[in-house]
Image: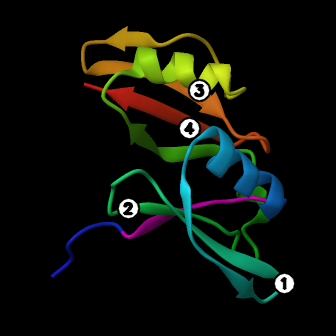
């Protein structure tokens, strides 16, 4: 049976630029970085989560670079994480917003992909 989502893909044109962002600013850790055709397969660990991210764009999906990531990165405290990541130079759409379902903030990576950071 299925136990969890192993990874989610983040589309990119410049893998080195993205690798630097996700490791240095976001604090993710490289699990795999190896050649795969004209690109590299770059798999990153997200904290202690069993789910990681992959910096790879399948052929024919280049138009996904710079779009909205349909998912959310979870944290215990959005306000504190927002402050910490902002200090590292992560670009946010605005300050955290409180909603009935929880608090969230939207941020972008260097190629314009947009992500949600949320907590309950």
Closer to us: 63 or 16: 16
- The residue that mark 1 highlights is 38
Q: Position of residue 71 (x, y in %)?
A: 44, 46
Q: Position of residue 21 (x, y in %)?
A: 71, 45
Q: Residue furthest bottom?
A: 37
Query: Disc 2 versus disc 3: distance between alpha carbons?
Result: 21 Å
Residue located 20% across and 72% down the image: 3
Q: Is residue 1 above or below residue 10?
A: below
What secondary structure is found at the residue carrying circle 1?
Answer: loop
Residue located 55% across and 10% down the image: 95
What secondary structure is found at the residue carrying circle 4?
Answer: strand
Query: Disc 4 versus disc 2: distance between alpha carbons?
Result: 16 Å
Crowdedness near tag 1: few (<14), some (14–19) or many (≥20) residues, C-alpha within 10 Å: few
Residue 8 visible in image: yes
Crowdedness near tag 4: few (<14), some (14–19) or many (≥20) residues, C-alpha within 10 Å: many
Span of residues in magenta: 6-12
- The residue that mark 4 highlights is 115
- The residue that mark 3 highlights is 85
Q: Position of residue 102 (x, y in %)?
A: 29, 20
Residue located 44% across and 17% down the image: 80
What secondary structure is found at the residue carrying circle 2?
Answer: loop
Q: Position of residue 112 (x, y in %)?
A: 75, 39
Q: Is residue 73 left or right of residue 11?
A: left
- The residue that mark 2 highlights is 51
Q: Earlier in the sequence, mark 4 or mark 2?
A: 2
Q: Residue furthest left?
A: 1
Query: Disc 1 versus disc 3: distance between alpha carbons?
Result: 32 Å
Which mark is nearer the camera, 3 or 4? 3
Q: Are marks 3 and 4 in contact (CB under 8 Å)?
A: no
């Amino acid at each position: 049976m299925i136990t969890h989502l192993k990874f989610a893909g983040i589309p990119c044109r410049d893998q080195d630029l993205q690798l630097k962002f996700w490791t240095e600013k976001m604090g993710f850790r490289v699990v795999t970085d190896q050649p795969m055709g004209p690109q590299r397969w770059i798999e990153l660990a997200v904290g202690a989560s069993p789910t990681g991210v992959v910096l790879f764009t399948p052929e024919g999906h280049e138009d996904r670079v710079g779009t909205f990531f349909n998912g959310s990165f979870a944290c215990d405290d959005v306000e504190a994480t927002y402050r910490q990541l902002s200090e590292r130079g992560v670009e946010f759409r605005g300050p955290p917003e409180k909603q009935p379902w929880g608090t969230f903030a939207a941020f972008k990576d260097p190629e314009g992909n947009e992500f949600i950071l949320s907590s309950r």
